[in-house]
Image (cartoon, rainbow, N blue to C red):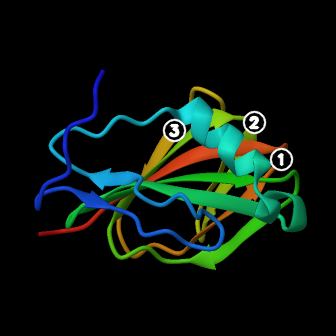
Amino acid sequence: MEKENLNENNKSNDATPQRPEGERILNAPLVEMDLLAFIDQIKNETTWADSERNSITIFKSETMTIVLIGLHENAELKPHKANGTISVQVLAGKIEFSTEHQSVQIEKGQMIALQENLMHGIKACTESFFLLTLVMKE
C-alpha cells in the first residue's frame, strides 16, 4: 500500500538520537503498523542491548496511544497507574500482570483489559513483547 502524502491532519514523530530517521507516522486517517518489523527494530537498538527493556510508540492520537514494549526475561515495570483504560496484548513470550488484588499470567495470543487508575505492574516470565493500548476519556 502506498503511503499518503503528509498533511496537517497527520502526526509523525521527530527524529531522536535513538531513532534518527524520524518521520514515522503516528497519526493519520489510516496508519499501517508492521509489528514484526517494530519488534526487530527494538531488538536491534542499543537500548535493548544495554537495558532491561525497550519500547516504541506506534500510534498516538488525542484519545489513544499504542506502544510496543519489549522486556527481557525477569524485567519489570514497577507498579504504577494509568490515567485511562488500558489493554495489554502479548505478541511473544509470557508476562505476569499484577494489580493490588489479582495476578494473571498471559502469553502470546492472550490479552487483558484494565480500568483506569488501578495500580498495576508487569514482570516478564520470558523475553516478551506486548502491545499496550491506552484510551483516554474525551
Q: Residues at badges 2 and 3 in contact (C-beta under 8 Å)?
A: no
Q: Residues within 10 Å of mark 1 (few under 14, many from 20)?
A: some
Quadrant in the picture for residue 121: bottom right
- How far separated are the C-alphas under marks 2 and 3? 12 Å
Q: CA distance from mark 1 to mark 3?
A: 15 Å
Image spot of residue 13 (x, y percent)? 40, 64
Q: Position of residue 61 (x, y in %)?
A: 24, 61
Q: Is residue 75 above or below residue 82?
A: above
Quadrant in the picture for the C terminus: bottom left
Mark sitting earlier along the chain (1/3): 3
Instruction: Please say if the residues under marks 1 and 2 sit with CB atoms less than 8 Å apart.
Output: yes
The image's mark for residue 35 is none
Alpha carbon of mark 1 to alpha carbon of mark 2: how far? 8 Å
Callout in the foreground (2, 3): 2
Please name the residue that numbered disc 1 is placed on: 125
Quarter that holds the N terminus: top left
Under mark 3, the amino acid is: Met
